[in-house]
Amino acid sequence: MTVDGTPAHLGQKIDPETAWVEVDGVALPVKPDLAYYLLYKPVGVISTTDDPQQRETVTSLVPGATRLYPVGRLDADSEGLLLLTNDGALTERVTHPRYGITKTYLVEADGAVGAKAVARLTAGVGLDDGPARAARARLVEVGRTGSLIEVVMTEGRKREVRRMFDVIGHPVKRLVREAIGPIRDRQLKPGEWRELNMAEVRSLYAAAEDS
């Protein structure tokens, strides 16, 4: 264990408000007022703390005792897992591309998506704000009117996945975020939330360190 980069010793006292503690090279948050929530964001809810148009926001779906902030974005038309926390260090690690924390989506796309179209997602496509590519993509199911594709991304530009599917000619009909790094929960339903346990929080920090 280290405290502020130096080895800890038995009986050492720390200031939980300012100390940076690591165990085996992975952060161990010790600040007493830190909170971590995992929410299944429903379609139509806005990924922000407030909205001038008075639309429902993600922060209105979780307890209000602690001021929380959504980690990254999930557009209003999309649904699935979203983290909310007041831990700025974790927020940076989950959202900044340099840490490589993946986000996994299940996409229902229009039409019969072929292997070549899926391959374009990982090869990269041109968007109006620069090239974009999926870290991984695999075809889950193909139907006459729609297909299911699992897409893993390491960045999260505005409506990026939807715009990528527009480019390959198969617009998104439904988009669900299924995982954030190692965090999954198939039990949560739209609008439901739960607190992350410390093992899950440390797994996110560890994923950032591994990347």
Image (spheres, grey):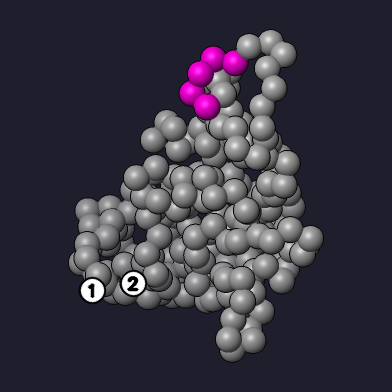
Earlier residue among tags 1 and 2: 1
Q: Answer with the quarter of the image where residue 139 lies.
A: bottom left
Q: Nearer the viewer, residue 16 or 200?
A: 16
In the drawing, does residue 147 fall left or right of residue 56?
left
Which residue position holds label 2? 163
Mark 1: amino acid: Asp
Q: Are marks 1 and 2 in contact (CB under 8 Å)?
A: yes
**Horizontal side of residue 118 vs 178, given as left or right:** left
Disc 1 on helix, strand or loop? loop
Q: Is residue 170 above or below residue 72?
A: below
Instruction: Give the x, y percent position of residue 42.
Output: 64, 70
| Whole-percent x, y for residue 136 in the image | 35, 48
Residue underneath mark 1 = 128
User: Residue at point 52% right, 76% down?
Assistant: 77
Q: Which residues are magenta?
A: 4-8
Q: Residues within 10 Å of mark 2 (few under 14, many from 20)?
A: many
In the displayed image of the protein, which residue is found farthest to the top? 10
Q: Is residue 39 covered in magenta?
A: no
Residue 69 can be seen, yes or no: yes
Q: Residue at x 51, y 66 (%)?
A: 74
Where is the C terminus found, in terms of image quarters? top left
Amino acid under disc 2:
Arg
Q: Main secondary structure of the magenta part?
A: loop
> Which mark is nearer the camera, 1 or 2?
1
Q: Is residue 187 visible?
A: no
Front one among 211 and 149: 211
Residue 135 drawn at (x, y percent): 33, 48
Please give the name of the residue rendered at 37% of the width and 75% of the height, measured from the top-left corner.
171
